Amino acid sequence: MAEKVISQVTFEIGQIDQLLVAYADLWECTQQGTPDLVEMTAMASVLHSFYNGLENIFLSIAKGLDQEVPTSAQWHRDLLVQMARETANRNGVISAELAQKLADYLGFRHFYRHSYSFFLEWSELEKLVTGLPEVWDQTRKALSEFLDRLKQ
C-alpha cells in the first residue's frame, strides 16, 4: 500500500511543480503591479489548482495509509488537520505551523469555488500569491521528508 501512496504523492508533486512553471510568467506579472481582473482570475485559478493538488496528496495518504478519510461537513479542514497529526500508521506529514499556512489556501479555494471571479480583490489575493513560492517550498520539503521516511 505504501508504494501506491508514494507513487500518487510523487505524481501530484510533479503536477504542482508543472503548474507553477506553466504560470511563472503570470506570477512575475503580478509582482510588477496590480493585476487586472483577467490576470487576477487566472492567478486565482492557479491558487485553486495548487490547493486541489495538495488535497489530492492528502487524500491519497488518508486513504492509503490512515484508511480513514474525514466525512464531516468540514471534511476539507479536517483532512488538513489530520495531515499534521501522527497516526498509528505514519508520522505527521506536515507541521501544525505549515497546516496553518495551508489553511489560508484552503479558505481561498472554498471562496473561489463558491463565488464569482469579479469579487476577487487584489489586497486579499496578493498575500496568497506572494507567499506561494515559500509555502510550496516548505510543503514540498515536508512531503519529500515524509516520502523518505515512508520508503524506509
Image (cartoon, grey):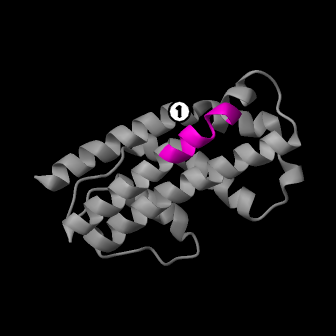
Dot 1 surroundings within 10 Å: few (below 14), some, or many (20 or more)?
Answer: few
- 39 sits left or right of 65 in the view: right
At mark 1, the secondary structure is: helix
Q: Is residue 22 above or below residue 53?
A: above
- Mark 1 lies on residue: 133
Q: Residue at x 57, y 69 (%)?
A: 74
- 150 sits left or right of 44 in the view: left
The overriding secondary structure of the stretch rendered in magenta is helix
Q: Is residue 111 above or below residue 36?
A: below
Residue 10 in view in this figure: yes
Q: Residue at x 47, y 43 (%)?
A: 17
- 114 sits left or right of 106 in the view: right
Picture coordinates of residue 95 (x, y %)? 36, 44
Q: Residue at x 49, y 37 (%)?
A: 135
Q: Is residue 95 above or below residue 28?
A: below
Q: Quadrant of the N terminus?
A: bottom left
- 39 sits left or right of 18 in the view: right
Residue 152 part of the magenta segment: no
Residue interval drawn in magenta: 18-26
Amino acid tagged 1: Pro
Report which quarter residue 131 is drawn in.
Answer: top right
97 or 137, which is in the foreground?
137
Picture coordinates of residue 115 (x, y %)? 81, 61
Report which quarter residue 30 is drawn in.
Answer: top right
